[in-house]
Amino acid sequence: MSKNSSYYPELAKKIDPPKGRLGVLLPGMGAVATTFIAGTHLIRKKLARPYGSLTQMQRIRLGKRTNARFPLIKEFVPLARIEDFVFGGWDIFKDNAYQTTLKAGVLPQDLLKPVQKELSRIVPLPAVFDRDYVKKLDGPNVKKGRNKMALAQMLIKDIQQFKKKNKLTRCVMVWCGSTEVYMKPKKTHETLALFEKGLKENNPDISPSMIYAYAALKEGVPYANGAPNLALDIPALSELAKENNVPIAGKDFKTGQTLMKTMVAPGLKARMLGLHGWFSTNILGNRDGEVLDDPGSFKSKEVSKASVLDAILQPELYPELYKNVYHKIRIEYYPPRGDAKEGWDNIDIFGWCGLPMQIKINFLCRDSILAAPVVLDLVLFLDLAQRSGLSGIQEWLSFYFKSPMSRPDLKPEHDLSIQHLKLQNTLRILMGEEVLDHSGLDYYESREAIFESAGKSKNR
């Protein structure tokens, strides 16, 4: 093996096989969660295809281009089968998954008919919920406890009973609930001991999503945060994840407008095109849109969305191009649109000699249709991470998030292509395959060859 080899055999993992069924626990069984559940059942019955899912449809290159192999990711790494999923979760409304899917209006009723029986069996457990953290929602299916620690213990019991009832040895939890109000890290978040003290004292700095995360991690269940609110990204829960050897990832599913930003902004920087301003607005009519109509919840989303451009464009390195970018974000609740979100972007750029140009993007997307395969991939990859002995923050899953988590001493990576390369390289490392950097070293002459060629020329 040459000294330039990109093999890292010492990092390859002994991965436990995905034996038995896998529990999929979803706090917040609204449009995103039920679209994911319904789609999975349809895919099981060969009535739909898992478009948008890397784990199900993407191939990964192994080896050099001269002798490359391209297996499907699901054939390359030992992922659980979607046929082995068992679904459960919590919601403030009592509707079963079929009723909720119909109300969400994402998937048509005729498509859902073949899986009505399976969806109707999935009934949400009473949720941990507090209107102080989500102002625009209220519902009857809510747990009551003397303090937040008692609520956490109820969730832990729910997890234990779910595993026992369904004869499960493994579960994964993905937060699909609504965006909570914006919060900053406080003292109670600094250590696990302070956090548990705060749970017992009903500290207002501990939100329902933090309670779910705590319960999952105490039970050794991998957890992903699909919303922008503060939850996993506090030292106390990172400490618990490492202590219990549990992988975690987050936050805020990268779906519509921000997905486009992480595609377009890297291209502008790669070509050294300047940016004066980027105006983004959305209209959205589902439950998420209603929740984001509250300024507190919108603030959480705004901060999540706003972090993307600075991280990609690096204004501290390129002040001439990106120091004074005016970045405006708006989300408007518009009930007639339902889950069919529409995003408009006006991008004012400049190029050679400072002359102005514009880019206009009108993205008519389906919020839950884009989020469902993200949930699927996170379930499978977090389960893989745990069976591989990985724990703590899984930065290689940044590909799926608007505000990806990273080590405290590192800035998160937002460039979609870099995130994708990191994800695939992590899979290669886990399986003992060569890491790819696309440098194409075969096209470069070695130093010895150059000297030899120069010597021959001189002697002619």
Image (spheres, rainbow, N blue to C red):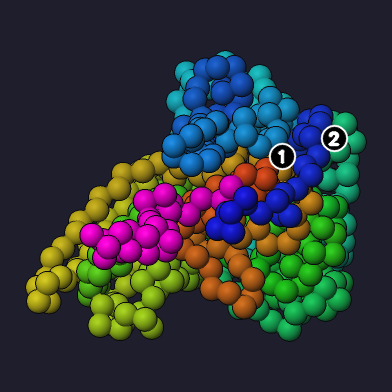
The residue at the point 43 percent across, 61 percent down is 448
| Image coords of residue 72 (percent x, y) | 55, 31
| Image coords of residue 157 (percent x, y) | 88, 48
- Foreground residue, 107 or 352? 352
**Residue flagged by tag 1: what amino acid is it?**
Val
Query: In the image, is 145 to the left or to the right of 111?
Result: right
| Image coords of residue 79 (percent x, y) | 68, 35
- Foreground residue, 161 or 373? 373
Say whether disc 2 or disc 1 marks the residue closer to the N-terminus: 1
Does the image show residue 209? Answer: no
Q: Is residue 449 magenta?
A: yes
Q: Which residue is mark 2?
A: 168
The residue at the point 49 percent across, 60 percent down is 402
Query: In the image, is 345 to the left or to the right of 91?
Result: left
**Residue flagged by tag 2: what amino acid is it?**
Leu
Query: In the image, is 222 to the left or to the right of 458?
Result: right
The residue at the point 30 percent across, 48 percent down is 363
Is residue 269 depicted above or below 399 in this figure? below
**Magenta region, residue range:** 434-460
Secondary structure at badge 2 equals: loop
Q: What is the distance, in whole Å, between disc 2 and disc 1 at their CAs? A: 10 Å
* Total number of numbered discs in the rendering: 2
Residue 338: which quarter of the image? top left
Q: Quadrant of the C terminus?
A: bottom left
Secondary structure at badge 1 equals: strand
Residue 379: mark in rendering: none
Q: Which residue is mark 1?
A: 24
